[in-house]
Image (tube, rainbow, N blue to C red):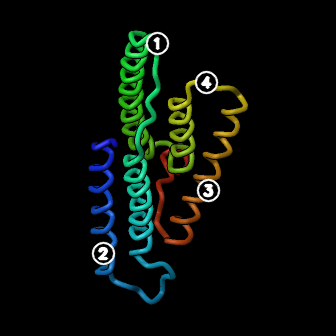
Amino acid sequence: MKKKDLVIGIIFLCISGIFFVATYSFPKPPVQAAGPSFWPKLMSVFLAIFSLTLILTSLKKPINVKNEDNEKSEHRVINEEKEGFRRSLIGILMTGFFILALNFFGFILGTIGYYLSIKVLVSKKYTWKNLMFALVQATLLTALIYISFGEFLNVNLPTGIIFK
């Protein structure tokens, strides 16, 4: 059992419940189909699902694998931890750059570029086929978000300096 994952899962499950209950105090305009509480409720439900998944996976017992060369295994784990920390730090820096770049490139180009850069960062082996698939994913995701917020919820998304 992974105690850290269990604790984090419980904390985020509680947070999602608090946010979900808090959305009932939002005003309900008669004109909008979704209302201002729609998106926070949806995000609370997703957070609860991911938290439950984390809790359930933390309760599973790890499979003990016997390794004859224990020294190499420990060295590999240390290298993977360093690589994971490095990728996390780069991901945080890329997110900060994405926030700054939204004003210049706008939502559509900024989101597609951010998605592609994170996808390349996460993948260990990358081919042109994977890159084209990621481009299609980024385009579809950006279109879905743009339609959801820009058209359905009437939220003005950044257009950027380039397109003004």
- Is 106 placed left or right of 23 in the picture? right
Quote the CA–CA distance across marks 1 and 4.
28 Å
Residue type, numbered disc 4: Lys
Q: Quadrant of residue 30?
A: bottom left
Q: Which residue is mark 3?
A: 143
Q: Nearer the viewer, residue 64 or 6?
A: 64
Q: Are marks 4 and 3 in contact (CB under 8 Å)?
A: no
Indicate which disc residue 79 carries: none
Is label 2 in a helix, a strand or a loop? helix
Q: Earlier in the sequence, mark 1 or mark 4?
A: 1
Question: Up-down: is 87 above or below 56?
Answer: above
Question: Up-down: is 134 above or below 163?
Answer: above
Identify the residue at image location x=55%, y=65%: 148
Q: Earlier in the sequence, mark 4 or mark 2?
A: 2
Is label 4 in a helix, a strand or a loop? loop
Identify the residue at image location x=28%, y=61%: 15
Q: Are marks 4 and 2 in contact (CB under 8 Å)?
A: no
Is label 3 in a helix, a strand or a loop? helix
In percent of width and height, residue 47 lies at 40, 59
Identify the residue at image location x=38%, y=16%: 74
In percent of width and height, residue 43 lies at 42, 63
Indicate which disc residue 21 carries: 2
Q: How many residues crowd around disc 4 within 10 Å: few (fewer than 14), some, or many (20 or more)? A: few
Q: Which residue is mark 4?
A: 125
Q: How many residues crowd around disc 3 within 10 Å: few (fewer than 14), some, or many (20 or more)? A: some
Q: Which residue is mark 1?
A: 68
In this view, the mark in front (1 or 4): 1
Is label 1 in a helix, a strand or a loop? loop
- Is 141 placed left or right of 106 in the picture? right
